[in-house]
Image: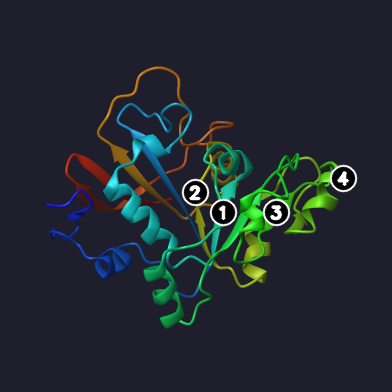
Amino acid sequence: MSDSTIDRVWPEPADDLDDAALLAQTAFPAGRVWLRANFVASVDGAATRGGLSGGLGDAADRRLFGLLRRPADVVLVGAGTLRDERYEGLRVDDASVAWRRDAGMPPHPVLATVSRELDLDPASAVFADAPVRPIVYTVASAPAARRTALEEVADVVVIGEEDADPARLRDDLAVRGLRRIHSEGGPHLFGSLLAAGAVDALHITLAPTVERGQADRIAQGVAVPTRARLASVLRAGDELLLHYLL
């Protein structure tokens, strides 16, 4: 069994799912706006190792990570996660480009981010190497000089006065035709989306490790309990890849 082999445990057990089966398992619902989030966490709830999420995932998690991006119209990432995880221009792999073209989609998804302070470098690879012009959502109180600089490399959209409004973000993406929204964090953005009732689904990889120490959870902010209904269980060795509807 290769390191990236993924089996389905529930609802219908199956071994060694190929990419087509995994895409079908995780497909966006047709005909509606859908926002889903993707995270990895340890058994004891840590969303990071050494401040980064990448250390928790393995080959199977990375495989599913790429496949979840494949059918997305837009990938939504918090500004802090863009910086911490060292995102570059958002490009999917060659197989995903071919799949998207066959489906009548643009070769790459749009990258969207949210930042109140606009503490983003317009010269960074996130913008300079972007195959599609990114979108930066911000607030009216954001520094004007930073906004002007970012407008050279991205669509800058105000969605609130002091705080970003997740409902306005979701509506703006839908108006742009970006209805299949795939979010990759971070915890503050996910927390605000949850509080606004703007998240439809969660894909979370449960890494087989106990991290201890201090680490972020996948969601931060004011406590707003959100009911989750299990949709599927995948397994890669001792790792579980779970899909919940919210």
The numbered dot on residue 145 is: 4
Mark closest to the chain's N terminus, 2 or 4? 4
Given residues 204 and 75, the one toward you in this image is 75
Amino acid under disc 2: Glu
Mark closest to the chain's N terminus, 2 or 1? 1
Do labels 2 and 1 touch, CB within 8 Å?
yes
Residue shown at the point (44%, 68%) measured from the top left: 71
Q: Nearer the viewer, mark 2 or mark 4?
A: 4
Q: Is disc 4 placed on a helix, strand or loop?
A: helix
- Residue 227: x percent and y percent? 42, 44
Amino acid under disc 1: Leu
Can you identify the residue that label 3 sits on?
A: 136
Amino acid under disc 4: Ala
Can you identify the residue that label 1 sits on?
A: 76
Do labels 2 and 3 touch, CB within 8 Å?
no
The numbered dot on residue 184 is: 2
